[in-house]
Amino acid sequence: MALCLTLPCIVYVYFAQFQPTSFWLLSLCVGLEQLGYGLGYTACMLYMIHVADGKHKTAHFSICTAFMFLGLMLPGTVAGYIQEAVGYLGFFWIVMVCCIPSIAVTYLIYRKL
């Protein structure tokens, strides 16, 4: 499921590199990307439900959700500046490199479970 969340970034690398114009190809790629993100975020939410254990499950889940969205908001504040500096193709390759830690952490968590 971690791959489902990170590998759809390849779609954007493809878009930036080849700039396809076919409606059906664009629709297929965007559909696959949305499917991957949907599965990945579902897995992330289920893991947070699993972690949020104890007397105050709802509070723990809310804190986990807040940290998850903080991880989305902070990079978003500088993403435009980075894209302007390196271009779309370079930016999406940077995004792909940034996916590596999430795969590594997921692997470490999987080994612990």
Image (tube, grey):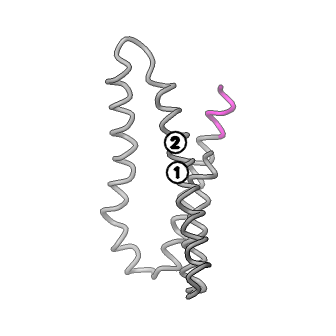
> Residue 59 occupies which quadrant of the picture?
top left
Q: Is residue 2 magenta?
A: no
Considering only vertical position in the picture, is 101 above or below 23? above
Instruction: Give the labeled residue for mark 1.
Output: 38
Q: For the residue marked with disc 2, what is the amino acid?
A: Thr
Which residue sits at x=48%, y=73%? 91
Across and down, in percent, residue 38 comes to: 52, 51
Label 2: few (<14), some or many (≥20) within 10 Å? some
**Is residue 41 toward the left or the right of residue 69 in the image?**
right
Q: Main secondary structure of the magenta part?
A: helix
Instruction: Give the labeled residue for mark 2.
Output: 42
> Residue 106 occupies which quadrant of the picture?
top right
Across and down, in percent, residue 52 comes to: 44, 23
Q: Is residue 108 magenta?
A: yes
Across and down, in percent, residue 25 comes to: 62, 78
Question: Is there CB contact under 8 Å for labels 1 and 2?
Answer: yes
Q: For the residue marked with disc 1, what is the amino acid?
A: Gly
Q: Nearer the viewer, residue 31 or 19?
A: 31
Across and down, in percent, residue 57 comes to: 38, 19
**Is residue 41 toward the left or the right of residue 111 in the image?**
left
Magenta residue span:
107-113
The quarter of the picture where the C terminus appears is top right
Considering only vertical position in the picture, is 14 above or below 52? below
- Label total for image: 2
Considering only vertical position in the picture, is 60 above or below 24? above
Q: Residue furthest front?
A: 24
